[in-house]
Amino acid sequence: MKKKVLALFLATTMVAGLVGCGGNSSDSKPDSSATNASTNNESTSNTSTDNASTDNASTGDASAIDTSEHVVITYMTTGETPTGTKEKYDEMMAQLNKILTEKCNAELQTYFISWTDYLSNYNLTLAQMDGTVDLVGTASDWLDAWPNSKNGAFLELSEDMLKTYAPQTWASVPAENWELCKYDGEIYLIPEDNYAQWTNHGFIYRLDWAKEAGLANGVTKWEDLTTYFRYVKETYPDIIPWDSDGTQYAQLAGGWIASHSNYVPIDGINAAAMWGGTRDDLYTIYSPFVTDTDSLVEFAKMMKEWDEIGVWQTDVLNNTSSTNRDDYRIGKVAAEQHHTQTWTDLVSHTPANTIYDDDPDAETGFFYFGQETGNVTALSITHGAMAISAGSKNPERALMVYDLLRNDPECYTLFCYGVEGVSYEITDDGLRTTPASYNQDTDNINGTTNYWWGRNDDLEIKDASRDWDKIDALYAEYDKLKIEYPYGQYVADIDNIRSQISNINEINTNYMKQIAFGKYQGTAEDIVAEYQAALKAAGIDEVTAELQRQFDALYK
């Protein structure tokens, strides 16, 4: 009982305040939104999944595993319990469980953690340690993977255990990636390290309108955004350039810093990612929010200009339920601020994006934060990961089920896409589309199982509605620029600096809302000076020094 109480206390307090963004579709999960991020490790796999299960001598003797007892494995994921799609979801699960029963005498059920207070409820469920769940979807940057590993909520996964019960996964994950899944020398996580995904933020905008504004190459720097927004406001007076809600101040500030420095933020300390290193000196910690004064003043001036242009509504700070993305789809706004995964949807000629039907000249561009400086950091391979609950009664069989979900083509396509012919079908050129009878409200399984913890590009079926020429070109550009996320094994110990971080969060929220939306009084110099003085008074220098001490102990 004492262990449970300790796990509960620590798990619910260690990394408070992370902000998720995105939706609950399988293409876009919540992300550590202040960080430029991607995962694209197809080239790092040291063997193909086709060969991974052929050598029991090196991966454990799976044929000797006793599976005589039928077991039920519970998979915990964030997301809402299916309602309108329940019938098709149940049909998919029935077919999946028939296969799982044949291959490892187990069946799968899903335990959904609703998005409402999701982190607290997620950690509370884990802390019970009562066998309620077995497979646990987790993440190092938004679902407390490392605190839960530290607190005993996750099971240590030995190499022999992984080789025996998840042989295909063990063989396909490179040794260096397993190292990034260790806490205190033990493996706790199975990484989603073979799935191309970019969640770095930026502005999605009308490229055709940017060209009209004289930006022949589109928006390539922040100053171009000012030109673009001014042109839209003057030329299309009925259009709100960007109908932002008042919660996007952290993304704006972080995006500006990424574009005007080589800052590399650390995930998981606070929502605004206010501490990190630089690409030139990754392990010397600083906070650009107190050091980069001149840059922040320029940011404040530009945001005041945007406010005066009318980029957003005058009551933007009170707007918390914007429909801006849906309005972009139908041509009512000129920009959407979100990440690359969202752009891959909005750039594509899907039925929802009626701008392309209404205006044959309509084009969509993407200005990613850090574009001017080439400052792009890859997403941690534990941004999505699978763990085994320490309270699981059947951890070995849970690993066997996971190995099938991740590597067996039939299991994978069922779990990710649903029943072929109902929820999807394959075109002659091998792409995934929807049948003529498809009903989004009842047939959509893609986005119901929320399998964000083991997706596999070797088995993915590309969505036929996506513009892959544009997507692949941008991904290739990112791959040339990116550095791997360097802080994947860092677990912040904030016990002695928790109060300072809490005060810093409050100060950043209060001031950055004013700065990022140009709603401050007086000069840009005055508001930045006031903001930085408040951060120093709250102890930001002490937090930086403590983080540096921890980095010195870990990395030097």
Image: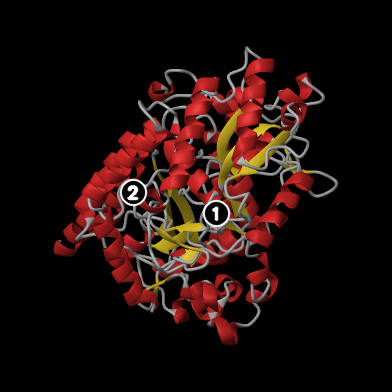
Q: Is residue 67 above or below residue 163?
A: above
* Alpha carbon separation for disc pair 1 and 2: 24 Å
Residue 36 in percent (x, y) is at: 53, 52
Name the residue rendered at 30%, 49% in the picture.
Answer: 16
| Residue 454 occupies quadrant | bottom right
CB contact under 8 Å: marks 1 and 2 = no
- In the foreground, 260 or 205: 260
Under tag 2, what secondary structure? helix
Q: Residue 545: image x %, image y %?
A: 28, 64
Q: Check disc 1 and report the residue beneath it.
A: 37
Q: Is residue 51 left or right of residue 155?
A: right
Colour style of the rendered protein structure: secondary structure
> How many C-alpha atoms fall within 10 Å of the one at disc 1: few (<14), some, or many (≥20)?
many
Taking the spot 51% from the left edge, 39% from the top edge, the residue there is 22
How many dots with numbers?
2
Across and down, in percent, residue 189 comes to 44, 66
Q: Is residue 505 left or right of residue 201?
A: left
Amino acid at the residue labelled 2: Tyr
Which quadrant is the N terminus positioned in? bottom left
Q: Earlier in the sequence, mark 1 or mark 2?
A: 1
Which of the two marks, 1 or 2, is nearer to us in this view?
1
Q: Which residue is mark 2?
A: 122
| Residue 423 shows up from this direction | no
Name the residue at the right extreme. 428
How packed mark 2 is, by other alpha carbons closer than 10 Å (few <14, some 14-19, many 20 or more), is: many
Q: Secondary structure at mark 1?
A: loop
* Relative vertical location of residue 75 with respect to residue 532 in this rendering, above or below: below
Q: Position of residue 499 (x, y in %)?
A: 19, 51
| In the foreground, 222 or 131 | 222
